[in-house]
Amino acid sequence: MANSSEAQSNGHSHGPTTKTYAVDIRYFLLTLLSSMSLFFTLGVVTAPSGPVSTSSSNYVTPISDAPTGTRTGNTNDAPPSNLNHQLNAELNTRHVNFKQPSYEDLGQGNGAIRYNSSTSEPLASAGVDINGNVNVNVDQATGTDANSAINRNHLPAGQHLLVDIKNVEADFLNSEERLSTAMVESVKAAGLTMLSYHCHSLIPSGVSCVGVLLESHISFHTWPAEGVITLDLFTCGENPLLPVVKDLERLFGIPRISKKTQELEEIETSWSHELRGFRNGEPYGVATKANYLDSKSDLASVVITALDLKVKKQVISTSSEYHRIDIWDILNPDETPSYEDAMKANLTENDSRWLTSDVTSPERLFFINGALQSMKDSEKEYHETLVHPAMLANPNPVNIAIIGGGEGASIREVIKHESVQSITMIELDKLIVDIAREHLPYMNDCSNIVDATSDNCFDDERVTIYYEDAKDWFIQRFGDAVEAATEKFDVIILDALNPRDNQNLYSNEEFLNALMNSLSDDGIFATHVGAAHTIHDPRADMSIHAPREKFFQLLEQNEQTGAMILYEEAHCGETVPCAFLAVCKNVECRDRWYAEPMVVDYEISVRIKERKDKLPNLVHFDGSTQHSFQ
């Protein structure tokens, strides 16, 4: 009661009293250690006997001891844990058999081997060495390689071709046998030598294959559900790889059936080609037949190496005695319709196709020795800039000479002038003219020009074509050692490769003297001289434009030069403005060159013929354009 009274007097109330027990910590620790010892002893007694296994899909045999065909890599000092073994086994089951290809040919002439996906054992060896020893085709009588390609000396250089194909049949993309057959056939079509190939089937779908070539390799990976295959072909051989693109598309582009229309889908192909390694020969970046595909060429940078073009169609690629000639149609995926495209497709306001390339026409590009010569969408701006300033700077151009100009566009622009009576064209390569007639008809079309005597500009009765070297042609007729000719030219249009790519012509002092001798007293010649100089370029005589600078210096030193006018045009389709040069024999040409825009517009109205459809005969050049050249 005393305790109770005391509790109440302190203002606290207690519930039922809880009984507690004191435990000695020494007994607790002794019990814990005894239990641990007991369980440890039981584990040792019940553990499986025998050595510990080190086999695992993740444990890699050292390369020196590994049989050919097994997966090799970095080794570890200790085998992996059981947990790692289980994870890797699960990974193999779900994705791919890393240890052994499911389909391969070891290059011994005995055909392909198919492997059991679970045991990795060959289902049919047909006498093939399971260790994968590759035998090159050796003549047993002589002991030498029967393939002469192995004895060739190759430069440390190669070609690299990437090809992506879309809308391909899923069954084809999931068949190692069909894919490997296509790979072997594509190698044959390319003129290459297959040594061996290996294919791995993936789970749930897809195939990865690699073929070892005498020249290097071919490989690909497939996505059957998406209908996509991506291929990689590298070779250090001599055979060109560009023709292989069509073979790859033919062999691997098996179209799938559309789920929506139940019709075969159109195959879509994107590809890129690059030269690799180190090469000898022509100066790097100069347009010649030998290196028309080097990375400095326009053909390579604009067309061949571009992987993202929506359209990349080879119209013609051929070689003549003098030039490499290429014409391509290309379309960037982000190009939108032009005015002509909109008219053809009847586009109206808010039509979604205004924002896509669905109805956009491809651009046609013309190359000589890999150097871009013209673009369909901007060739009129280029040729009007080249021809008309010089023609209007002469008071009465009657006799005209055109050097080069095999596309016919310079003739087309000259024929537009009322005063012209004679056009002499000196073109080295007849094949360029023949190709232009067939594949570039818009450049030599004179059918809409009033008083043109032929629908094709080349066939106009005022045109005479000489298929000769222009340098020799002028020297033989107007050289210093030749008696002065009575019939001279009022305007000469030099429509050839620029000074950097045609140094033989532009740096020949004898030719330039003959060129000036051939001009009448008020004569002018005009030419394209490459990309416009910028303030960031080095000194002209020490840069890649040194040949152009030498050309300028030879003209400045010529006693017949009255005036030199350098002008630029930014609407030629190039990434930088094009530079042009007009050289006058009479300094008074400057008065006509620097005329007011309204005066130039009046001269155009008087001297340029009308079109039969009454539309303007010039699409770009006018008085304001001439003013920008001043």
Image (cartoon, rainbow, N blue to C red):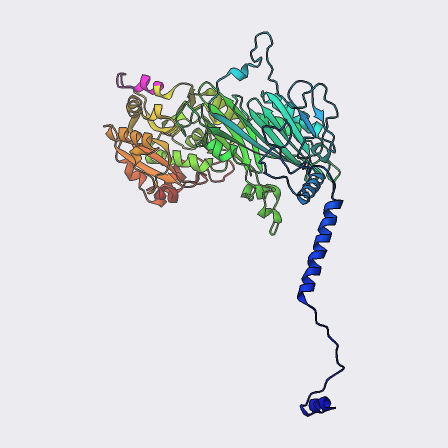
Regarding residue 546, the answer to whether it shows in the image is yes
Give the extent of the magenta segment: 472-485
Query: Is 223 a magenta residue?
Result: no
Query: Is 476 a magenta residue?
Result: yes
Q: In this picture, is 523 found above or below 37?
A: above
Name the quarter where the N terminus is drawn: bottom right
Q: Nearer the viewer, residue 191 or 310?
A: 191
Q: In this picture, is 32 found above or below 377?
A: below
Counting from the top left corner in percent of width and height, residue 195 is at: 61, 21
Q: Nearer the viewer, residue 237 or 257?
A: 237
Regarding residue 394, the answer to whether it shows in the image is no
Counting from the top left corner in percent of width and height, residue 48 is at: 74, 41
The quarter of the displayed image where residue 472 is located: top left
Q: Residue at x 72, y 46 (%)?
A: 44
The quarter of the displayed image where residue 425 is located: top left
The quarter of the displayed image where residue 230 is located: top right
In the rendered structure, the answer to whether residue 155 lies left or right of residue 212 reads: left
Q: Residue at x 58, y 23 (%)?
A: 213
Counting from the top left corner in percent of width and height, residue 343 is at: 58, 43
In the rendered structure, the answer to whether residue 41 lies left or right of residue 409 reads: right
